[in-house]
Image (tube, coloured by chain):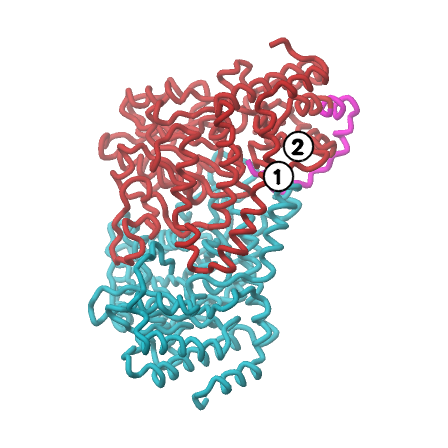
Chain colours: A cyan, B red
Amino acid sequence: MTTPLTRTDCAALDAADPLAPLRDQFTLPEGVIYLDGNSLGVLPKATPARVAEVVQQEWGVGLIRSWNTAGWIDLPARIGDKIARLVGAGRGELVAADSTSINLFKVLSAAIAIAREDNPGRRVILSERSNFPTDLYIAQSLARQHGMELVLAASEEIAARITNDVAVLMITQVNYRTGLLHDMVALTAKAHAVGALAVWDLAHSAGALPVDLTGADADFAVGCGYKYLNGGPGSPAFVWAHPRHASRFWQPLSGWMGHAAPFTFDTDYRPAEGISRYLCGTPSAVAMSALECGVDTLLAAEPLGGMAALRAKSLALSGLFLAQVQERCAAHGLPSVSPAEASRRGSQVSLACPGRGYAVMQALIARGVIGDFRAGDGSPQEPDLLRFGFTPLYTRYVDVFDAVTALAAVLDSGEWQQARFNQKAAVT
Amino acid sequence: MTTPLTRTDCAALDAADPLAPLRDQFTLPEGVIYLDGNSLGVLPKATPARVAEVVQQEWGVGLIRSWNTAGWIDLPARIGDKIARLVGAGRGELVAADSTSINLFKVLSAAIAIAREDNPGRRVILSERSNFPTDLYIAQSLARQHGMELVLAASEEIAARITNDVAVLMITQVNYRTGLLHDMVALTAKAHAVGALAVWDLAHSAGALPVDLTGADADFAVGCGYKYLNGGPGSPAFVWAHPRHASRFWQPLSGWMGHAAPFTFDTDYRPAEGISRYLCGTPSAVAMSALECGVDTLLAAEPLGGMAALRAKSLALSGLFLAQVQERCAAHGLPSVSPAEASRRGSQVSLACPGRGYAVMQALIARGVIGDFRAGDGSPQEPDLLRFGFTPLYTRYVDVFDAVTALAAVLDSGEWQQARFNQKAAVT
């Protein structure tokens, strides 16, 4: 593709984009260019009415009967089957439940149990140093519990560190800071070759790019409902186990929804067959229903080429952004820490902006362009970042052009120097 | 109180009831008498608008900014402080989070860790045989993990079984089957006297009767958001740790929301001080906001005497029900398994109805009186039950009278013999 240099060129790309109608599925605020769908997806138009129906009719009128009559009890499996279509999992293999952190605890516990049985001497859980913190925290907890060691490697050193002391490899497929896309097929194969298991966090890949858990022969996976799946703030997450593992062990969060027969109220826990045993307590019917609306916005792309088509557009958008920044913000030195090579890039671009990154992002947000800021550790290896997500369902080429225009203006004018630090939360 | 024998007497009680206006806080379906608020509370009138605001304004317009500007990040602590007022906990000691099952895993893990440090030889987790299954399942899982033994005692034998081999006593304050109210003060004192810890599940007591965790010197507690707290189907739950324990151990679900500084994105987990470390992943802002509306309906009773006044009404309602059933259904033999003594009774009444219980409840529901059915194990000790909850916020004396009228009609007419078994789920 020749880099489009004008806004008119970008508008022409939008006009020719077969995926453009998918944007009509969403409510987007006026005057905002939203490049943070990798942190919190936007509101589907269908969601308010569906949530109102669940609250007012199913709960308000149906009351307790709605567990049966409105199918609340089926939500985790029904939504799970829809998500499965996005990540290369089979029907009945994936459920929506709890949070990503809690689901990771379940699958990592199971993976450790399997590894200890099959390879008793192994003590290493291997992950990426810049993996999202909650993944590392959960792994730390389980490492403490099981007398194992959490080993962290730099992104480019992970493959080499998969040696025969590794029990479990645990990686987020797309790095939340850099947007680096790890090779699920190669890393899983390498893990298996040394006798280790591979656990994948799909937080920044499910709904962003084609994922093929079955094709990659992955062992376990978890993912997030509120980023690319547009399930709403703090939406339930999801969990998958390869069928060869799903029924092999208790996962420790053995709540009643994971029982083989929850409504017989047995005194003894007897885990359900398959992925259902990865359920725990009672899920929020309201939050689950909002998640389903979000997932449906992705399934709506299936007749238009599905995740492969969305992936192509996502890369076109992020490639455009990289080229535009290079061309129009060159004087300000904002090197990308995201892979230039499209095949190694997720659906985001992160620009190093040491020292003034927070202020620049605040000034950009004041102009209506919402990305986010991720602090580094002060080292050249982990600088402060401006992070921009390109969600192909609703981001237009003109949005990318206009965002770079705003970024250039913030830098050229120096208005970022007026921005104040008043942020309390910054949810990935 | 003289037992009111006529519907007119009941209407007079309602007319004189200072708590009667609290019912106006709720949307109740026409033609339904709802006696299942112990399983799923009803819809507060404030909830639909609040949920719509969270979805359409805070999420739809505010997007990621709402973590700060709409205070999403503060929801677990803010709602926790409100719930704390209902259960005798201090400010900053309780958070809303996750499900009851998951919160029980957290506190039981911490209690076991403390017990193993303070009393290394102890191996017994003691609970009630007819405790709600998910509590037993979580305890089973932790007993397996830690090489401990889950010992189950009949309700009336628990106190005697608290001996010096017990590490942790784990009891649901009000039994979900019988409505038996355990003596939190006495059982906690006995546990402490033998050097054990006391973990309380408040699922059927928080919002149903006065609870005083601090006064009872309890060690840990969890509770449910969707029963007496009216938070909606599958609402987030809550968790409390006595301040003497809260910062003592990692709880194993060490997600980023429990980190001392979640937004510095540290590689190492460093638990927050106090109860905040019992948070794990990202909570649903929608589900949390609905829970807050539910909790507010109970706080609205504070100027009218609060939980003490609600408790008095609850006992009047359940006492009326017991007396009416005895008087008007005597021919059909429906002995109560709930304590006749008011001080030992929660906010529900369960009638033994072996063999035909499910059909009777279905026929009753067909008449618009919603209670629920709990299967027994076929033994005389654990019969099939018709279960009726009396939530004093919105149940009227005439509702009790009319419910017994319907029950008598179902039994007198034999119409229960037409009821079909078509139930898939029966959520406590």
* Disc 2 secondary structure class: strand
- x and y percent of residue A377 in the render? 22, 64
Dot label at residue B292: none
Q: Which residues are magenta?
A: B406-428
- x and y percent of residue A212 in the render? 47, 70
User: Is B1 drawn above or below residue A329 in the view shown?
Assistant: above
Q: Counting other residues with Cα less than 10 Å from the Cα at mark 2, is it few (<14), some (14-19), or many (20 or more)?
A: many
Q: Which residue is mark 1?
A: A64
Question: Disc 1 residue type?
Answer: Ile
Task: Note whether residue A188 is visible.
Answer: no
Q: Which residue is mark 2?
A: B370
Q: CA distance from mark 1 to mark 2?
A: 9 Å
* Disc 1 secondary structure class: helix
Task: Please state if B154 lies on the left or on the right of B390 as rendered.
Answer: left
User: Is B340 drawn above or below residue A359 in the view shown?
Assistant: above
Task: Tell me the residue at 60%/10% (across/down).
Answer: B1
Task: Tell me the residue at 39%/83% (across/down).
Answer: A324
Q: Is the C terminus of chain B in the top left, top right, bottom left or bottom right quadrant?
A: top right
Reply yes or no: does residue B408 show up in magenta. yes
Given the image, what chain letter belongs to the residue carrying mark 1?
Answer: A
Task: Note whether residue A78 is visible.
Answer: yes
- Work out which residue is located at the far left of the displayed protein and give it: A379
Reply yes or no: does residue A380 show up in magenta. no
Task: Please state if A46 lies on the left or on the right of A165 as rendered.
Answer: right
- x and y percent of residue A199 in the render? 37, 61
Question: Disc 2 residue type?
Answer: Ile
Pick the front one: B190 or A254: B190
Task: Please state if A394 lies on the left or on the right of A3 as rendered.
Answer: right
- Work out which residue is located at the far bottom of the displayed protein and give it: A2
Q: Are marks 1 and 2 in contact (CB under 8 Å)?
A: yes
Q: Counting other residues with Cα less than 10 Å from the Cα at mark 1, is it few (<14), some (14-19), or many (20 or more)?
A: many
- Work out which residue is located at the far right of the displayed protein and give it: B413
